[in-house]
Image (tube, rainbow, N blue to C red):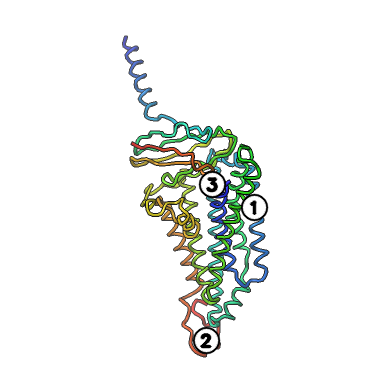
Amino acid sequence: MRSLALAFLLALFVSAAAAADPGPVTITIRDHAFVPAEIKVPAGTKVELSIRNEQAMPAEFESASLHREKVISPGSAISVYVGPLNPGRYEFFDDFHPATRGFVVVE
Amino acid sequence: MLATAIIVFREVLEAALIVGIVMAASQGVPGRGIWVGGGVVGGILGAVVVAGFAETLAAAMAGIGQEIFNAAILFAAVAMLGWHNIWMRRHASELAAAANRLGAAVRAGSQPLWALAFAVGLAVLREGSEVVLFLYGIAAAGDGGAGAMALGGALGLAAGVTAGAGIYFGLVHIPMRHLFAVTSWLILLLAAGMASQGAAFLLQADLLPPLGTTLWDTSFLLPDHSLTGRVLHALVGYTAQPAGIQLVFYLATLLIIGTLMRLVGGAPRPARRKGAAGSRPIGLQPGE
């Protein structure tokens, strides 16, 4: 009984630790669109974005407000870290196809 | 087609402005066409190679290969531009006694051009590899048609080259005795802007702290993607939302190159005196 309670506590602890590090946020570029086009991240923490380009053409993930600029070859993924950021909406786009836009929403 | 033209123009613009300034700065130097042309051709060849290895580059160094590569290119260009300015200043002071049209021409004539050629090559390589990737991407997607792509690319290139020619012909209107002071300032600001861009890449790779993610935000006034914003970005490193570390690199570059220029050049040029200027022995110049 006691060991069961211990195991339960341990499980709680492990899940809490997992929640503290949510891992990378995945974004996919498909048919000239970011999927999802809006991601939410907590303020004041560093977050890894993993961006996969599923198109036949290269893309360039770029954002003036996030200071990020990175080429993504067709069929491959890159990762960029953003933050810690203040609350707000930060726009990003595909520099090779500027109509393709998305937002990082920090709250 | 128009979208292609605009994107190619944007990438070409920065390199073209640098070429225009370098051509003005090397005004009167024999063989400058060969040097600068060599830099451009070398840069284009390099761009094709870099574009071909884009995927390998991105995956290199645990995913920060692209950032390291861009930063290295930018800092190398900063070093070349700085070296050029320091060299010019040193020789300017040697020839300060003859600070007239002839003196300026002599000074220009003995100027080595490898540093400028190298800086041009690096700028073309960096911007060019994106153009190559972009055009390759359109060709691979195959939805625009090869003819429209080629036409768009050519239009964008022509517009970029026109901008570069524009700054060149604007600059060479400046009288010879002032021209090198002006190009020297322009090159100093170019170098500072490139250093700030290099810092942004190292920040992106998480190798530098941001020191303030956004120092100020002038994007409502002059956004980065506006034409004026882009021209100012290329010329003086303007960015609407700079990180603190970018400003640190910008100012440090101005300070380091500026100080070295002052050290090798000695005190500000002596005021010209009627008659006496030509007879002053060079060995007694300040800073010699």
Residue extending furthest bottom?
B275
Same chain assignment for discs 2 and 3:
yes
Q: Give the foreground label among 1 and 2.
A: 1
What's the mark number on residue B277?
2
Identify which amino acid the numbered label 3 is placed on: Ile
Q: Residue at x 54, y 43 (%)?
A: A96
**Tag 1–tag 2 contact (CB < 8 Å):** no
C-alpha gap between disc 2 and disc 3: 50 Å
Mark 2 residue element? helix
Identify which amino acid the numbered label 1 is placed on: Ile
Q: Which chain letter matches label 3? A: B
Disc on the earlier residue, 1 or 2: 1
Q: Nearer the viewer, residue B85 or A65?
A: A65
Tell me: residue A104, above or below residue B122.
above
C-alpha gap between disc 1 and disc 2: 46 Å
The part of the image, by quadrant, that contains residue B123 is bottom right
Disc on the earlier residue, 3 or 1: 1
Identify which amino acid the numbered label 2 is placed on: Ala
Q: Which chain letter matches label 2? A: B
Q: Which residue is mark 1?
A: B44
Crowd around label 2: few <14 · some 14–19 · many ≥20 (10 Å)? some
Mark 3 residue element? helix
Q: Which residue is mark 3?
A: B68
The part of the image, by quadrant, that contains residue A16 is top left
Same chain assignment for discs 3 and 1:
yes
Residue B279, given in percent of the width and then of the height, sits at 55, 88
Disc on the earlier residue, 2 or 3: 3
Q: Give the foreground label among 3 and 1.
A: 1
Crowd around label 3: few <14 · some 14–19 · many ≥20 (10 Å)? many
Tell me: residue A2, above or below residue B119.
above
Crowd around label 1: few <14 · some 14–19 · many ≥20 (10 Å)? many
Residue B53, given in percent of the width and then of the height, sits at 63, 42
